[in-house]
Image (tube, coloured by chain):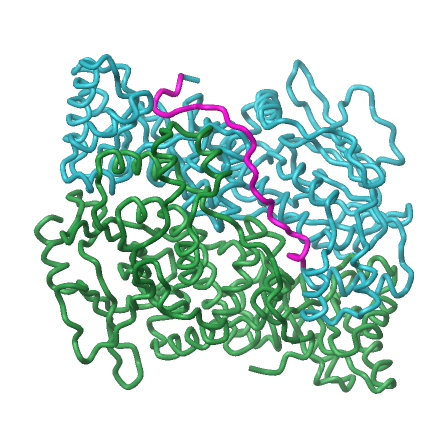
Chain colours: A green, B cyan
Amino acid sequence: MPALKYAPTLRYRLAVVPPYRKELSLDLYELTMSQVFWRRGMDGMATFSLFFRGYPDNRSYYVACGIDEAVDFLLNFRFGPEDIGSLRETTPLSEDFLTYLAKVRFTGDVRAVPEGTIVFADEPLLEVTAPIIEAQIVETMLLNIVTSATLFATKASRIVEAAAGRPVVDFGSRRTHSEESAVKAARTGYIAGFAGTSNLKAAALYGIPAFGTMAHSFVQAFGDEYSAFDAYANEFPGSTTLLVDTYDTLEGVRNAISVAAAARKRGASINAIRLDSGDLGQLAKDARSLLDAAGYPDVQIMASGGLDEYSIRDLIASGAPIDAFGVGTRFGTSADAPYIDSVYKLVELDGKPVFKLSANKRTLPWAKTVMRRFINDHMAGDLVINCAQSSPTPEYVELSRNVVTDGINRFPVDSIETVRRRVAEHLNSLSPEFRGLVNALEYPVKLAPELDLTRESFG
Amino acid sequence: MPALKYAPTLRYRLAVVPPYRKELSLDLYELTMSQVFWRRGMDGMATFSLFFRGYPDNRSYYVACGIDEAVDFLLNFRFGPEDIGSLRETTPLSEDFLTYLAKVRFTGDVRAVPEGTIVFADEPLLEVTAPIIEAQIVETMLLNIVTSATLFATKASRIVEAAAGRPVVDFGSRRTHSEESAVKAARTGYIAGFAGTSNLKAAALYGIPAFGTMAHSFVQAFGDEYSAFDAYANEFPGSTTLLVDTYDTLEGVRNAISVAAAARKRGASINAIRLDSGDLGQLAKDARSLLDAAGYPDVQIMASGGLDEYSIRDLIASGAPIDAFGVGTRFGTSADAPYIDSVYKLVELDGKPVFKLSANKRTLPWAKTVMRRFINDHMAGDLVINCAQSSPTPEYVELSRNVVTDGINRFPVDSIETVRRRVAEHLNSLSPEFRGLVNALEYPVKLAPELDLTRESFG
């Protein structure tokens, strides 16, 4: 990856930002169903399995994210007095059940793949085993947390793939579906290989490099482009990226060259120019020629403006001399596939398998674990097995881990850099035919015989 | 709208839930640009205009939402000590500028349309006039807040239109792009005409009716469907909706009928059944026949499962006897149009117009206001004028209001019911040809001559 010279890459401490309290953001039915369970003394151990059914268009793998947040959510789960007060007024729940609810904590187990693991359809990302009420009432937010983070991470990993080694920066904060989504997209983008983000809260919370250039309004506020560029280059000599398309783009490049010349006289330099509109491929070529001819081969070219994995792939294929990409809206909304068909299904109750008879939506019974086989360091096929009935096959590596036992965490949370390395390593070991942007082959995932047989008999 | 009998519609107080602090979630460049402005003493009064360029596919109007939250964000804007500490470590900002930033408050003016106003492309939803730094640093979050809320409200209003008077309930929380998005979708869905939401935090925060049915896991936990239905009907006699598709759907309807018969003997009743998979239109017809033949014409049928405005329109057109709809993923991600091309453009500086010369992305200069003409209570065309240069034309109603002056709010926030009524009234006055789900006509929006001339001269 070429050095990023157009923006600072400082390191940050974790800022004190209050987390989003999510307990109350659950579907009413989780609680009405639970009141029935409670009234009837139904406290059996239930296993719910969180997995994805199939793939959105053009997807062939998932970067599992949100696992660590989901575990954190479970470990800290509680309804506070204000929550109970709200529930009293917004729901038909009975007073005795509300009294019980105030005391509910998560006391169960969690099996999950590590944050950043590459997973496939039908493979459980996370399984909760707990008394059925504890496992049921967390459904809404577990799905929300894991699905949204995986959605962004998967989209980002495709963009990184398309950029083929050139740095990509997240600029999506203004168009995500909330502020929380902006922070989540920035975090998962970095995990999936982005160089950084423009979002300063994500930078502060997760230690992600922050990047920034300038807006058209900045240039307009100065009236003339040269003065705007010169003022910025003087203020931020180590991290100057000049936005050249406010008026005429190539005229903008010439102004950038003049400012670079002035900077050179001061012993300084500018880092890059940014193209944000027009025919980015042609403009990049023209800008490169102008910069090289003027003696500034080190000034890089960044492109942005409606980019995604498809347009980045096409720009690179056309030979556009673009050194870095900024991706905003289409990343921050996962625009070509804005959702994943995620489910959280009851698969085991009191040690017995649970399944639906309806043929159109299968749910594989039993608590499961995901096994992966490697050949010459390449992923050669996964196997999903019943935790209880199958013993791990020696040539397979087990991906799922017992993360939480009896409500107590067994693993420290990985650092974001560790998770980022995991994603890179996993993708490296996934052959290109399984991770193409379009028409990728379906990676082989086998279901162990006891799961398959159950499906056969009842499907 | 038929009475909703399958879920409670209690009224709630506003719960104490901490708001999401959003100040730090801004793009780095807002602050680096501002440091340059500050260093050079550039404190001119700037007007930035927030509007949408064109429409996503199949959209022909917008339900402006997020205005009230945006104003609230501005009025409470401040960087706290932790924020400044984070900025010190995540950015190249200078210490003297950080000292200045800690004191920045919003002291400017806001012109905006009321929450829930129907607006069109090119019409400013909100304009900020303030010293340029104050107006610039709020760009990222103003765009995020207004765009995301408008996206959801607009999607919801299309779904309400398709449902043609039948109640629609938001079930989207598990698939939105964050927990905050779930709450936002629930709020804006209700504003746009939904009957309620499954999300209890939204119910508590905004006094929205909460709805819920049951999940497949509930039926599975009982093993047999009749027992599950009967247990729920006994626990919640006033609000029982039975999910009938866990195993065989029509068998499920027969079990629901048996439970309804048992309830009738107790002097109680069940409210509805829910279909969540399969051929919803045919199943609804078959279920209706079974229910009617058994003497339960009052038991309603709710449908859910991958629904959006297109499938709801088709179901109703096919004569499916569905009384209410639950919409989840496709609403909660605005799946067919997951973003709006929103912009926040510098349009006036120190009383002078600001514009870009590039032809591909026009920005209309001048601070503006939106005027609307009515003929026989129907919207007959809008006019966007320069606030300063044009005097309001008598036959037009002015939509934009001076909401904030010198950093002080001039209007109380409308209640959610007031906003909801506004949306309904506005849409009622918009002729059907301008609000069709597909191929709608483009509603006429005229730009006043002085805006048009400027564009002509420089476009």
* Magenta residue span: B3-26
In which quadrant of the rendered image does the N terminus of chain B lie?
top left
Q: Which secondary structure class fits the magenta region best?
A: loop
Let me know if residue B389 is in the magenta part.
no
Is residue B24 something that shows in the picture? Answer: yes
Q: Going by the image, does B369 lie left or right of A304? A: right
Q: Position of residue A33 (x, y in %)?
A: 29, 36
| Residue nearer the viewer, A418 or A74 | A74
Q: Going by the image, does A445 lie left or right of B428? A: left
Q: Position of residue A402 (x, y in %)?
A: 29, 66
Is residue B456 something that shows in the picture? Answer: no
Let me know if residue B9 is in the magenta part.
yes
Q: Position of residue A114 (x, y in %)?
A: 37, 69
Q: For residue A109, which quarter of the picture?
A: bottom left
Q: Is B112 above or below relative to A168?
A: above
Q: For residue A148, which quarter of the picture?
A: bottom left
Q: Position of residue B202 (x, y in %)?
A: 50, 36
Q: Is A358 above or below relative to A284?
A: above
Q: Is A120 above or below relative to A163?
A: above
Q: Residue at x 21, y 40 (%)?
A: A42
Q: Going by the image, does B205 lie left or right of A88? A: right
| Residue nearer the viewer, A22 or A226 | A22
Q: Is B366 above or below relative to A301?
A: above
Q: How many marks?
A: 0
| Residue nearer the viewer, A169 or B310 | A169
Q: Residue at x 46, y 76 (%)?
A: A418
